[in-house]
Every structure is written in structure tokens, then in C-alpha cells.
């Protein structure tokens, strides 16, 4: 396993003038900017506008059946997005590297094309292009999954493809095959373990995108979690703040866990994980 | 997919009989067909439909009137507001994100992985929850608003509003600064200690090092970060919609209103014209991004 960490622990950057005081001031100010809204939400959600301590916002939230149903829907769509992203991105990126290297640049360039079409315009186009078969396709919320896979491609494909590029895939494939490994075994036994970080990163980005996406779901009238938050926000501010806080934390906890688990193999190197931002 | 790969290997191995060249090429290119088909169905055909629709009247005749309406009156104003928002957000996010990335990269204990994963969460899921987190912070009854007013600073009496372009610029930093950090961390960590040492041994001061070596090396990455952030801010919809319930006239909000039918009927293709306007703006930004990426990768080899 080749892991290149240029710059090491940043000693030379410190020598180049990014001193302790500079780092401390920057990290405290930026960290505060990111923490204050979270703390303010936590306080607001239990004190509300009138300053009485109450958990009513959370209680009415968990009692609301559409809270659970929208969360469940978002999770299902996110899982479908992750699976579909894996099936599309991983084989394509490896295939193009091994079999048609000259197309690599083209596929990479194509993967960022979705950045050029804002998702509100994608919805506009989907509605315009497929209006005749719309009633058939757009009844199932799972139509969101392929749309999210496409919209998250600039993040997922590039993340995985960067990992593939940093690995000498062709040498590994030749080595594995000269030892008699089949393609399946080469892929599962040799390539994917070496590409684990890139794979996890790509899938996380796709899943996170699907969980937080609002535009497409809202305009196609599916009650995913973000759509639900905006709906209750119209009538109940404290509830919306409470559920937003839960959403931000729900997004954070598993992702931080994956980061820690992902670094599990090099545990000794990761003794100290500084908390910033 | 895997089984096709297996078959291909047998086919290309010396022991198997030679096949016609064209079929082999078909097999070879077959591996990228799902990817291309995906982009075609979910991106290119819809984008094409917007393009065509922008030049069509509602009864299907070619016309320029959609574009004329889209670039005049209230719709022109929405383009101006969108530009104000995205340019203002970009300037702040680029500067703050760059400085933050420098500080993170120089910190011992490799917080990079943690910052990177938090940044990718923040950059992607901020959307709706963010709007409410900031209502609790800087809204009319937000906690920071209250604390400041108890200190004698009455934000809302001085013309500040969270539900305005200025307010959105502040809120957008929450997901734009992480984008800049994500873009810059890698290139900053790629600065070799040899370059620092070389500059120092030639007598360069720290400021001189950053001015003459650091910034020029990082400039392609800074440019690509700027462009990505601009496109992100220009296209963002969720936070603005959740904060202002569609009342702030930004281009994506206007399109959303047209899709949801919150406007007078008979303007179906006006949305397509506005959409085309957005595509043109963001596509220009994306072109700059591709070009700057090409330059940036030169230093990574």
C-alpha cells in the first residue's frame, strides 16, 4: 500500500511563517463561525422564542409520523444512490484506466459537466424532456436516486478517479494476472482494497448529497427529510430548528466515524486527531 | 460488468483465437457505455430540452421573446441579485477558506482527514438545516442577534436582515468556506519542504516566499476554487428558498417558482430561457475551472 503524504506534518509550512499564533487565531475564529450556529440551534430548540426551558419541540417532532416517514424515505433514497454510484463509478473508472486510457481525460471532464447545469435547471429539463412518460416514471421516489447519482458525479467520480490515478493500476493488474488471478479476483482482492479510501470517500459524498438534497425532491414533490424540514419551518420555527440540528448532527456522526474507522489500519499514526472547524 | 471483464481477458490472452477487430473495440468501449448513457439520459437530454424550449413559444414556434423577457424587468433584476450574492460570497469564502486551509495544513497531528470529512459534509448537506440554524443564530429572535442587542448593537435597526442578500452571503459561507478548504488543502500540502528551504537559503523572507513561490504555485488551485465557489453560490437554491420562502428574487428561485406554478400561466418557456441563462453563466465558470485544473495538476506530478 503506497500512501503518499507530501508535506509530512506541515513542519516546513510552520517554518514558512504559519506560526502558532496565526494558526490559533484562524482556527478559533473559523471554528467559532462553524460552531456558533450549532450551539445557537441547540439553545433555541430547547428555549424557543420565549425563554422557557422545554423539550416540547423535540417531543412534538418525534410524535409526528411524517418526521419518521420522511427520514426513512431519505435514507432509502440515499442507500439506493450509494449502491448505484458504486456500480457506475467504480467499474467505469477502473475500466477506462486499464482498457482505454486515452478516454480517461474525457470521462473525467464529463464527470464535472453536472456542475455546469444547476439542479433547478435539471428538474426543468427532466420535466420538459420526459413530460410524456412523466406520470409513469415520476410516481416512485426512487427516480431521485439516479438523478442524485448524476448530480453527485463531480464529487464521487473525481474522488474515486483520483485514487485510481494515484495507484499504479496497470502494474497491479499485470502482477495479479501473471500470478493467475481472474479479473474478479484482481478487482476484489487487489484493486479495491488499495482503493478503499477513494471508494469510501466517493460513496460518502454521494450518500451525503442524497441525504441533504432539497431542490429536486421539493420540485418533484417528494417528501424527503429536507423537504419536510422546510414544511414544518413554515409553521413551527422551534421544531424546524430542532430537526435541523438533528439533521446536521445525523450527517456528522457517521461521517466522522467512517473517517476514524477508515484510518483504523494506520491507527498508530493517527494517535492525535485535532478537533478543528 | 465483472463477467465482461473476465471474458475480455480470455479474449485478449495469446492463447485465445484472434477475433475481428471491430468486435473487440466494441467490447472495449462497452465498459464506458453505462456511464455515458447515464449522463445522456439524466443530464444532456434535459439540458437540450431547456435549450430548445428557450427558443420556442408556448405553441411550439421559434421565438426570441422568452429570452427578451428573461433579460428585462424583474427577471433582469434577479440576475443582478444573483450576481451580487454569488460574487460577494465568493470573495469572502475564497479569502477565509484559503487562510483556514493554510492553518489546517500547518497544524501538527494530521487533522486533515477530520477537517476534510467535516468539510465535505458541510459543503454538501448544509442546504436546508443551515437556513434554520442561522434563523436561530442571526434571525429576528436569534441568539447572536439578542446578545448583540443587549450589548447595544441592534442589527435589524441598522438595516441588516438575515433574509436579504447580505444575510445569505453570511449563511452561504457555512458551505462555501469548506469548499475552498477542500480545494486548497491538497495543493497546500503538496508544497515541498525543499521549496521552502531553497527560498530560505537564497535569503527570501517568509513574506517573500509566499509572494514569489507559494502564491504562484497555488494560483491555479485558488482560481479553480474561486470558480467552483462562484458556480456553487450562483446555483444554490435550497438555503435561499428555506430562508426566504421564495420571496427573494434570485434566478434559481424564479425558476423554481415557475416550475411550481406560482406565477401566471402561459409562461412555460420563460423558465427555460432563465435556465439557459444560468447554464451559460455556470458553463463559463466551469470552462475556467477545467483550464485551471489542467494547470494545477502540472505541479502535482
Image (tube, coloured by chain):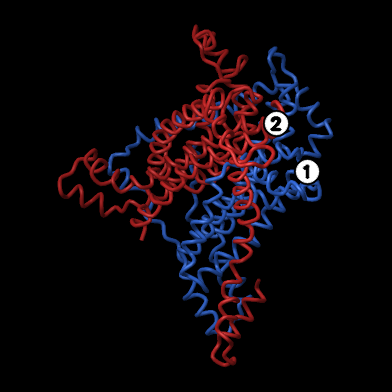
Side of B288 where B21 appears, left or right? right
Residue A5 falls in image quadrant: bottom left
Q: Residues within 10 Å of mark 1 (few under 14, many from 20)?
A: some
Query: Do tag 1 and tag 2 residues touch (Cβ < 8 Å)?
Result: no
Determine which residue is flagged by label 2: B266
* Labels in figure, total: 2
- Of B214 and B268, nearer the camera is B268
Tell me which residue sits at (69%, 39%) in the image. B59
Find residue B11 and report its horizontal and vertical position in percent. Answer: 59, 85
Residue B21 falls in image quadrant: bottom right
Find residue B214 and report its horizontal and vertical position in percent. Answer: 29, 45
Q: In this view, does A28 lie above or below A206?
A: above
- Of B207 and B251, nearer the camera is B251
Q: In this view, does A187 lie above or below B223?
A: below
Q: Chain A is drawn in which colour?
A: blue
Side of B142 where B103 appears, left or right? left
Find residue A216 and report its horizontal and vertical position in percent. Answer: 68, 41
Q: Colour of chain B?
A: red
Determine which residue is flagged by label 1: A72
Amino acid at each position: 500500500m503506497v500512501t503518499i503524504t507530501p508535506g509530512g506534518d506541515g513542519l516546513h509550512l510552520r517554518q514558512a511563517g504559519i506560526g502558532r499564533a496565526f494558526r490559533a487565531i484562524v482556527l478559533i475564529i473559523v471554528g467559532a463561525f462553524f460552531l456558533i450556529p450549532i450551539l445557537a440551534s441547540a439553545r433555541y430548540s430547547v428555549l424557543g422564542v420565549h425563554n422557557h426551558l422545554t423539550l416540547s419541540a423535540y417531543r412534538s417532532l418525534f410524535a409526528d409520523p411524517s418526521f419518521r416517514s420522511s427520514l426513512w424515505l431519505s435514507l432509502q433514497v440515499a442507500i439506493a444512490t450509494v449502491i448505484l454510484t458504486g456500480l457506475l463509478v467504480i467499474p467505469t473508472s477502473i475500466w477506462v484506466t486499464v482498457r482505454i486510457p486515452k478516454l480517461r481525460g474525457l470521462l473525467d471532464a464529463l464527470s464535472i459537466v453536472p456542475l455546469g447545469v444547476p439542479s433547478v435547471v435539471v428538474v426543468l429539463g427532466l420535466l420538459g424532456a420526459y413530460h410524456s412518460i412523466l406520470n409513469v416514471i415520476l410516481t416512485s421516489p426512487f427516480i431521485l436516486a439516479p438523478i442524485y447519482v448524476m448530480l453527485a458525479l463531480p464529487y464521487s467520480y473525481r474522488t474515486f478517479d483520483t485514487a485510481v490515478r494515484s495507484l499504479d493500476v496497470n502494474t497491479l493488474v499485470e502482477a495479479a494476472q501473471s500470478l493467475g488471478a481472474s479479473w474478479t479476483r484482481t478487482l476484489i482482492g487487489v484493486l479495491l482494497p488499495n482503493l478503499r479510501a477513494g471508494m469510501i470517500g466517493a460513496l460518502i459524498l454521494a450518500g451525503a448529497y442524497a441525504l441533504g438534497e432539497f431542490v429536486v425532491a421539493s420540485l418533484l414533490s417528494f417528501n424527503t427529510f429536507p423537504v419536510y424540514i422546510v414544511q414544518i419551518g413554515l409553521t413551527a420555527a422551534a421544531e424546524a430548528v430542532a430537526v435541523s440540528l438533528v439533521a446536521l448532527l445525523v450527517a456528522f456522526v457517521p461521517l466522522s466515524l467512517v473517517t476514524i474507522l477508515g484510518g483504523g489500519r494506520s491507527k498508530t499514526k493517527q494517535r492525535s486527531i485535532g478537533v478543528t472547524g | 460488468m465483472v463477467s465482461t471483464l473476465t471474458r475480455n481477458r480470455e479474449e485478449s490472452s495469446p492463447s485465445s483465437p484472434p477475433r475481428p477487430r471491430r468486435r473487440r473495440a466494441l467490447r472495449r468501449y462497452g465498459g464506458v457505455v453505462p456511464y455515458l448513457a447515464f449522463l445522456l439520459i439524466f443530464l444532456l437530454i434535459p439540458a437540450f430540452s431547456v435549450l430548445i424550449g428557450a427558443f420556442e413559444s408556448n405553441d411550439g414556434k421559434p421565438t426570441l421573446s422568452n429570452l427578451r423577457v428573461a433579460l428585462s424587468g424583474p427577471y433582469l433584476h434577479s440576475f443582478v441579485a444573483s450576481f451580487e450574492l454569488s460574487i460577494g460570497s465568493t470573495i469572502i469564502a475564497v479569502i477565509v477558506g484559503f487562510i483556514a486551509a493554510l492553518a489546517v495544513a500547518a497544524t501538527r497531528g494530521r487533522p486533515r482527514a477530520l477537517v476534510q470529512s467535516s468539510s465535505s459534509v458541510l459543503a454538501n448537506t448544509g442546504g436546508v438545516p443551515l437556513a434554520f440554524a442561522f434563523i436561530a443564530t442571526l434571525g429576528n429572535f436569534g441568539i447572536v442577534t439578542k446578545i448583540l442587542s443587549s450589548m447595544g448593537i441592534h442589527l435589524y435597526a441598522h438595516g441588516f436582515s438575515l433574509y436579504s442578500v447580505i444575510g445569505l452571503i453570511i449563511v452561504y459561507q457555512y458551505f462555501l468556506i469548506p469548499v475552498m478548504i477542500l480545494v486548497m488543502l491538497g495543493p497546500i500540502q503538496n508544497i515541498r519542504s525543499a521549496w521552502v528551504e531553497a527560498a530560505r537559503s537564497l535569503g527570501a523572507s517568509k513574506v517573500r516566499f509566499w509572494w514569489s513561490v507559494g502564491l504562484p504555485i497555488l494560483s491555479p488551485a485558488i482560481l479553480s476554487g474561486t470558480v467552483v465557489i462562484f458556480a456553487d453560490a450562483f446555483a444554490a437554491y435550497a438555503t435561499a428558498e428555506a430562508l426566504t420562502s421564495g420571496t427573494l428574487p434570485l434566478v434559481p428561485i424564479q425558476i423554481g417558482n415557475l416550475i411550481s406554478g406560482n406565477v401566471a400561466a402561459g409562461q412555460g418557456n420563460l423558465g427555460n430561457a432563465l435556465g439557459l441563462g444560468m447554464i451559460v453563466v455556470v458553463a463559463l465558470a466551469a470552462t475556467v475551472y477545467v483550464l485551471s485544473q489542467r494547470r494545477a495538476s502540472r505541479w502535482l506530478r
